[in-house]
Image (spheres, rainbow, N blue to C red):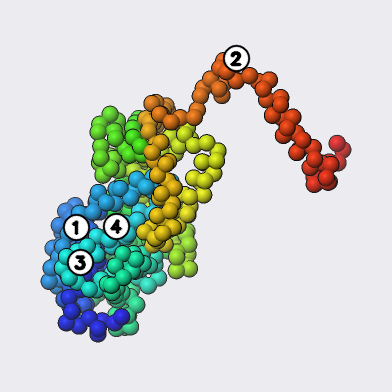
Amino acid sequence: MTVHELKGKRIALAASGGLDSCTVTRWLCDQGVEVVSVTADIGQPDELDIDDIRKRMLACGAVEAVMVDLKADLAEDALVMLTANATYEGGYWNTTGIARHVTTRGILKVMAEKNLQVMVHGATGRGNDQVRFQLVANMLGPEYQVYAPWRDDAFLENFGGRREMIAYCEARELPITATQDKPYSTDANLLGLTHEAGKLEYLDVAADFIDPGMGVFPKDAPDQPEAFQLELKMGRPSRINGESVDPVEAILKANEIAGRNGVGIGIHTVENRFVGIKSRGVYESPGMSLLGACYELLLQQILDRRARRFYDALSPLLSEQIYQGYYYDLASQMIRSALKPVQDVLTGTIKVSLYKGNVTFQSSEDVTHTLYSSELSSMEAIGDYDHRDSEGLLNVLGVGAKSLNVSGQMEKDLLNGI
C-alpha cells in the first residue's frame, strides 16, 4: 500500500506522540490524508500529562485525537506473563511486545466505532513492532488495511532516519521532544522502559549509560534493605505490604518499591529480532522483575517435577510468541490454557528483601497448594519418612546403573584404575 492510495481518505494512526508519530502525521496531512490520531494510555511513566500527546497530535495536523485507556488491559496480560515467567532472551520482560498487542486491539475497536478502514503506524522496517502491528491487525481484523510509511518509497525518499525527521519537524515548528543531541530512543509503558538506538547501538557503550526513568541503578540504591510482601490469590495480586491492590495498582506499587532499590534497572541484551537481525537494548522493568521473582518463589513450592518440566517448556514458547507478534494465535491460546491450572494454585504470601538490585527470599505463608514439607525433607529424626525405605528404591535404580557398565556404555577413560 502507498500513500497515493490514501489521498482524500480518513485513516487511524497509532500515535505515541513521539518523533515518528509527529512526522508521519504532518507528512500524511501534506499528502492530502485526514489523520485520526489514536493513542493508547498504557501508563507511560515518561508522560507527566498523558493528554499532552493528544494536544501534540492535533498541533501536527490530526483532524481528531482519541485517547483510549488500556492500562487495565495491559495489566491483565502482564499477569499472564508473570504466571508464565515469559521473559525473552537475556531477561527482557516483553514490555513493549505485549503493549503492541494491547494497543493494536484497542485501536481496532476505535476504528470499528468510527468506520475507519486503514490503520497507519510509524514502526521502522527494521524492527519488531511493524510485525506486531501487522499480525495483530490481520488476526483480529483482516478486513482492515495496514499502511506503514517506512515501507513506502514516497516516505523513504524524504526521510532516511531521525536526523531528517527532526529537521522536518523543526522547520514546521511541530511540538516534538526529540533533538539531534538525544543519545538514544525510549519506549515507555506501565510495565517498563525500553531504550535502544543512537549511542546504544555501539557495544562499547555501557548499560549504565542510560538515564533511568523508573528508579536507580543498584549502586545508587539505599544502603538499607527494604521488605516487600506480596499476597497472591489464584495468581492475582491481592495485597502488597498489607494493602489491597488491583493489577494496575500492584504493578505501579511494585515499580515504585523495586525502582528505588535498583531492581530490574539496566537489563542489557543483544537479542534476535524477528526480522533476522541482532539488536541491542537496555531495559527497565522494576515491578515485573520484583513480582516475577515472587511468583517464581511461590512456584518452587507448588510444582512437582513433571509439572515443572512442562512449565519450563511453556515459558520460552510464550515469550517468543509475544515477542514475535503471535500472542493471540492458536498456539498462544493453547499455552494460556495450559497455564490456567498453574494460575489456579498460585495462592500464598511471599516475603522478600530488596537490597541494591537483589531480591532475597525471607519467608512464605499460607501457601494453600504447597508440596513442601519441612518434616518430610528434614535430615533430623522427625516426620514419617524412614531412611531405610530408600534401600529398595536404590536397589531398583542400581540395576540400570550396573547394566551401563556391563553393556560397555561407560567411557573407558572413566574406568581406568577402577
- Quick one: SS at disc 3? helix
Which of the two labelled residues, at mark 2 and mark 1, occupies the earlier sequence position? 1
In this view of the protein, can residue 211 be seen by the observer?
A: no
Name the spot of residue 35 as percent of width and height, x first: 17, 73
Name the spot of residue 29 as percent of width and height, x first: 17, 78
Q: Residue at x 37, y 33 (%)?
A: 347
Q: Residue at x 36, y 39 (%)?
A: 235
Which of the two labelled residues, at mark 3 and mark 1, occupies the earlier sequence position? 1
Q: Which residue in the protein does label 3 denote?
A: 112
Q: Residues within 10 Å of mark 1 (few under 14, many from 20)?
A: some
Task: Report the Cα–Cα distance between label 4 and label 1.
Answer: 11 Å
Q: Which residue in the protein does label 1 denote?
A: 68
Q: Residues within 10 Å of mark 2 (few under 14, many from 20)?
A: few
Q: Residues within 10 Å of mark 4 (few under 14, many from 20)?
A: many
- Quadrant location of the N terminus? bottom left
Closer mark to the observer between disc 3 and disc 1: 3
Disc 2 residue type (three-letter): Ala
Task: Report the Cα–Cα distance between label 2 and label 1.
Answer: 62 Å
Which of the two labelled residues, at mark 3 and mark 2, occupies the earlier sequence position? 3
Task: Report the Cα–Cα distance between label 4 and label 3.
Answer: 16 Å
Q: Nearer the viewer, residue 222 or 337?
A: 337
- Quick one: SS at disc 4? helix
Quadrant hosting residue 330: bottom left
Task: Report the Cα–Cα distance between label 3 and label 2.
Answer: 68 Å
In the image, residue 236 above or below residue 168:
above
Q: Which mark is residue 102?
A: 4
In this view of the protein, can residue 285 be seen by the observer?
A: yes
Quadrant hosting residue 293: top left
Q: Are marks 3 and 2 in contact (CB under 8 Å)?
A: no
Q: Which residue in the protein does label 2 denote?
A: 381
